[in-house]
Image (cartoon, rainbow, N blue to C red):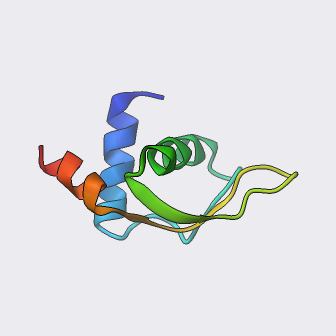
Amino acid sequence: MSLNMLIETLKLAAEAKLPRVVDSKTPELLIAVRQLFEAGFIHAVDASADRGDCFLEPRITLPGLSYLKS
């Protein structure tokens, strides 16, 4: 995953423009959201199951906002 994609995804989260559900239907976005979620830059409901990863209602966190401003 490129740093540019991660930053663009974080910007979308800051603007509340991420989809309500991020899953395998958007694989590149799913990878970015998972990485940002694990880093603590995005908060979401982790609805992952045996069928695959799924994040609900992703939104930016304060550390994510701080990172964008730096």
- What residue lies at 29% left-to-right and 53% top-to-bottom? 64
Foreground pick, 66 / 58: 66
Please state if 63 lies on the left or on the right of 43 as rendered.
left
Please state if 62 lies on the left or on the right of 52 as rendered.
left
- Coordinates of residue 43 in the picture (x, y in percent): 46, 63
- What residue lies at 71% left-to-right and 51% top-to-bottom? 53
- What residue lies at 49% left-to-right and 51% top-to-bottom? 37
Residue located farthest toward the right when viewing the structure as drawn: 50
Foreground pick, 67 / 11: 67
Which quadrant does the C terminus fall into? top left
- Coordinates of residue 16 in the picture (x, y in percent): 36, 70
- Coordinates of residue 5 in the picture (x, y in percent): 39, 38
Q: How many marks?
A: 0
Foreground pick, 10 / 63: 63
- Coordinates of residue 3 in the picture (x, y in percent): 35, 30
- What residue lies at 87% left-to-right and 51% top-to-bottom? 50
Residue located farthest toward the left when viewing the structure as drawn: 70
